[in-house]
Amino acid sequence: MMADQAMVRKLSACETMGSATTICTDKTGILTLNQMEVTKFWLGQDPVGVSSSISTNLLNLIHQGVALNTFGSVYRATSGSKFEFSDSPIEKAILSWAVRKLDMDMETTKLSCTILHVEPFNSEKKRSGVSMRSNADNTIHVHWKGAAEMILAICSSYYDASGSMKDLDDGERMKFEQIIEGMAARSLRCIAFAHKQIPEEDHGIGAGLQKLKEDNLTLIGLVGIEDPCRPGVREAVETCRCAGVDVKMITGDNIFIARAIATDCGILRPDQGTTSEVVVEGEVFRKYTPEERMEKVGKIRVMARSSPFDKHLMVQCLKQKGHVVAVTGDGTYDAPALMEANIGLCMGIQGTQVAKESSDIIILDDNFDSIARVFMWGRFVHYNVQKFIQLQLTVTLAALVINVVAVVSAHEVLFDVLSLLWLTLILDTLCALALATQQPTKDLNEGPPVSQTQPLITNIMWRNILAQAVYQIAVGLTLKFIGESIFHVNEKVKNTLILNISALCQVFNLVNAKKLEKKNKLFWGITGIAIVLEVVAVEFLKKFGDTKRLSWGQWAACIGVAAVSWPIGFLVEYIPV
């Protein structure tokens, strides 16, 4: 699983993944590449291509809004070297755009003013702010940056492309909303910048040090940030759907971006997403009554503008409805949802330490395709456990019945402690190793999830166990009572034949349990080792198992009788259960 970019922290989560019916996934960095770039810039209601068309005053405001309202940094070793940016992917995209497209000098901008108060990004308000005092004219300004619709709601005016300030009436506001929705429909994350100059009469002691002004702001501009979908994510989502796993996207983006990305990734069909049952906002979901949530949670495909609490609430509702839920997370506030889910999946690249410690499996490359492969591994582990149980119960049941009949009828034990130890421990351990060498195949994701309510030993397994066990019992008891006359041997050789045939039946039954592949050298190597160990035990460790050496003809007879397990395994598949 490590080779498939999945680091398992809790072993039981492997098998639980095979039973998952729903996955609640984040968008950024999992469904998308998390390689963000500013591709659109609007001043007023006009798109802008080059910085030369922007007025000097407006350009300075943009520089201040970008350079001061961030925790990021810009580094350049020499004048000819490349710029290096540090912070979140969104901040790095904005800084890169401002430096490269708008010729922003971050250090110069910071030295030109004094920062008075910073309000960090708030997941509820979806914005961050800063107040600063200009060193040139001693004026105080407030800058806000955040989700476009949130910033637009606190603005009462806007700058046009020429730098003139205009009133933001209902008609103009509707035009801006259409611009934002248009960018969102093209899967662009829309960020807005707003500004307000504090009047001179409000410059008293402590001005700008307390709560920042959040009303009557002037909209500076809008940027559209592109974060393309990961290659292959659509196919991975379709794989999950074919496997009976319902994919739900939970994101902090607005409803238009969320719908566009979900459609691009295949979570929504083009004709879906127009109803509130399929795409909802976190606040709406939160306000549902418990009964409404339980009724609608199964139909929801996308939750936009969600908080970590909304994700946790959705996981709780899905579990109450009987779903086995996997959830992805990377932030500290995702920890409750990761711990609440049946399987918590943390992102290895952008995940915090708290999130990783709260998870069951860490996805090392933050890729949704890796999550789809974990589902396949979960089912593979479950089916291999079933195969091993089938092998173990077959030999145990056969040995038990043969011993009971031998004790009752002849007052002797056919399989002593060492013989049973050899059959059930040494050979079965090798069988388990042989099964573990297999690789999961894509057809494992073509059926429904493994039900947690169905018995571990299914009716099909009982059919296979009984068929093979009955055959081994019949062979063992036949040899017990008339083996000496059939092979013309003494009792000690007869008992060796019974033990040898039982061991070889296990090896042939192992091949029955395995799905044959064209290439699996390790499986056949371990199977060969089991046969070699059986030959060594019979021929050279006579005192260990109280056995006698067998002739070539007797070995051929043992192999022939044991090989009948193959056609039996083939024929019983046609018995309906």
Image (cartoon, rainbow, N blue to C red):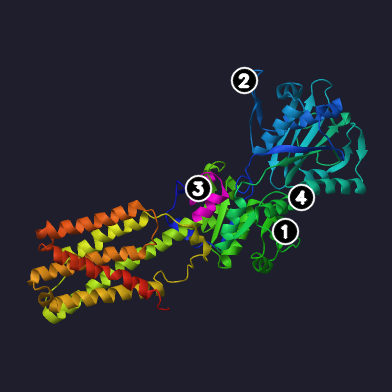
Quarter of the image for residue 132 reads top right
Kind of residue sitting beneath label 1 = Pro
What residue do we see at 73% from left, 37% from top? 38
Kind of residue sitting beneath label 4 = Ala
In the image, 74 versus 115, the foreground residue is: 74
Please tell me the numbered disc located at residue 185.
4
**Disc with the residue nearer the chain's start (3 vs 2):** 2
User: Taking 335 as reference, is 553 above or below it?
Assistant: below
Please tell me the numbered disc located at residue 77.
2
Query: Which residue carries the number 3 mark?
Result: 362
**Disc with the residue nearer the chain's start (3 vs 4):** 4
Whether residues under marks 3 and 2 lie with C-beta atoms below 8 angstroms apart, the answer is no
* Cα–Cα gap, marks 3 and 4: 32 Å
| Element at label 4 | helix
Q: Is residue 381 left or right of residue 256?
A: left
| Element at label 2 | loop
What residue do we see at 62% from left, 53% from top? 234
Between tags 1 and 3, which lies in front?
1
Please tell me the numbered disc located at residue 270.
1
**Disc with the residue nearer the chain's start (2 vs 1):** 2
* Cα–Cα gap, marks 2 and 4: 39 Å
Between tags 2 and 4, which lies in front?
4
Kind of residue sitting beneath label 2 = Ala
Range of magenta residues: 354-374
**Disc with the residue nearer the chain's start (2 vs 4):** 2
User: Taking 371 as reference, is 243 above or below it?
Assistant: below
Between tags 2 and 1, which lies in front?
1
Q: Position of residue 397 (x, y in %)?
A: 27, 73
